[in-house]
Amino acid sequence: MLTNRLGVHIQLRHVAKAFDSGASRVTVLHDIDLEIRAGSFVTLVGKSGSGKSTLLNLIAGIDRPTSGQIRVGETHVQTLPESRLAIWRGRHVGFVFQFFQLLPTLTVLENVMLPMDFARTYSGAEARRRALTLLERVQIADQAHKLPAALSGGQQQRAAIARALANDPPLVVADEPTGNLDSHSAEGVIDLLAAQARAGKTVLLVTHEREVHREVDEVITMSDGRVVSRAARSAA
């Protein structure tokens, strides 16, 4: 039986991110103050270079802020040393990427089991049972023993979602997960992410797809490294 850890509240205070480029420094995020309630489904939108993917990576602990504070649940993410940050990510954040990032030499089932092995959250037999249950949930259990290359793009992204949920993370982040999918497959992926929010998880989605907005609780628009607007679903 799958557990379901509830989503986490996210709080950012005066968060900035800059990169050194030769002799100059480029600031991509400027003094971000932001709160996202637990269990909500939120999209980050904006033009390329607006800072939305950078913001997502900071919240997920993939990257670190240059300054400011990021709190995810009870964890002050920016204070964790690298060793503890990797453990925290593995157990608390599920990632869904645009290009799936499935390991090509592992079966779909083995790909879903991999995060449980790394985080040591479930034993071998239990991990296998859980992975099969997750694949049933995303409706591709019949593809479990195939290599990723044998699946369609939509099926691979469903496998990636199952993998993201392997350790029952309270936070699920998705960066352009429908960018390489046809409209039918894209709709199915968004439905799966929305279902995670309905189940109580916090879901953050970076996307250019305007049709997605009818499914989410809030749309956060970014421009030039700043949050310029927030709109609840009723107003989106």
Image (spheres, rainbow, N blue to C red):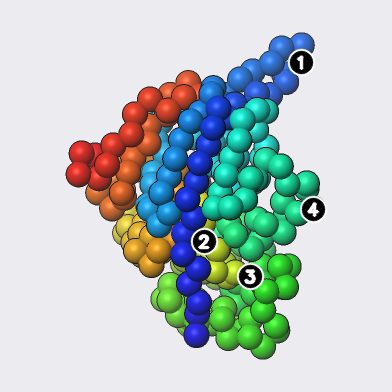
CA gap, disc 2 to disc 1?
39 Å
Task: Residue type at mark 2: give it.
Answer: Pro
**In the figure, residue 62 lies in which quadrant?**
top right
What residue sits right under mark 3 in the picture? 111
Circle 3 SS class: helix
Residue 212 position, x and y percent, is 31, 48
Circle 2 SS class: loop
Mark closer to the chain start, 4 or 3: 4
Task: Give the residue displayed 50% in from the left and 24% down from the top.
Answer: 225
Is mark 3 in CB contact (under 8 Å) with mark 1? no
What residue sits right under mark 2 in the picture? 170
Check the image and name the residue furthest to the top: 23
Task: Give the residue displayed 20% in from the left and 44% down from the top.
Answer: 234
**Is residue 121 at all visible to an observer of this figure?**
yes
Badge number at residue 22: 1
What residue sits right under mark 4 in the picture? 83
Check the image and name the residue furthest to the bottom: 125
Mark closer to the chain start, 2 or 1: 1
Residue 208 position, x and y percent, is 38, 39
Task: Give the residue displayed 50% in from the left and 68% down from the top.
Answer: 5
Instruction: Judge whether 138 appears above or below 231 on screen.
Output: below
Task: Residue type at mark 4: give it.
Answer: Ser
Mark nearer the viewer, 2 or 1 = 2
CA gap, disc 3 to disc 1?
39 Å
CA gap, disc 4 to disc 3?
23 Å
Mark nearer the viewer, 4 or 1 = 4
CA gap, disc 2 to disc 3?
20 Å
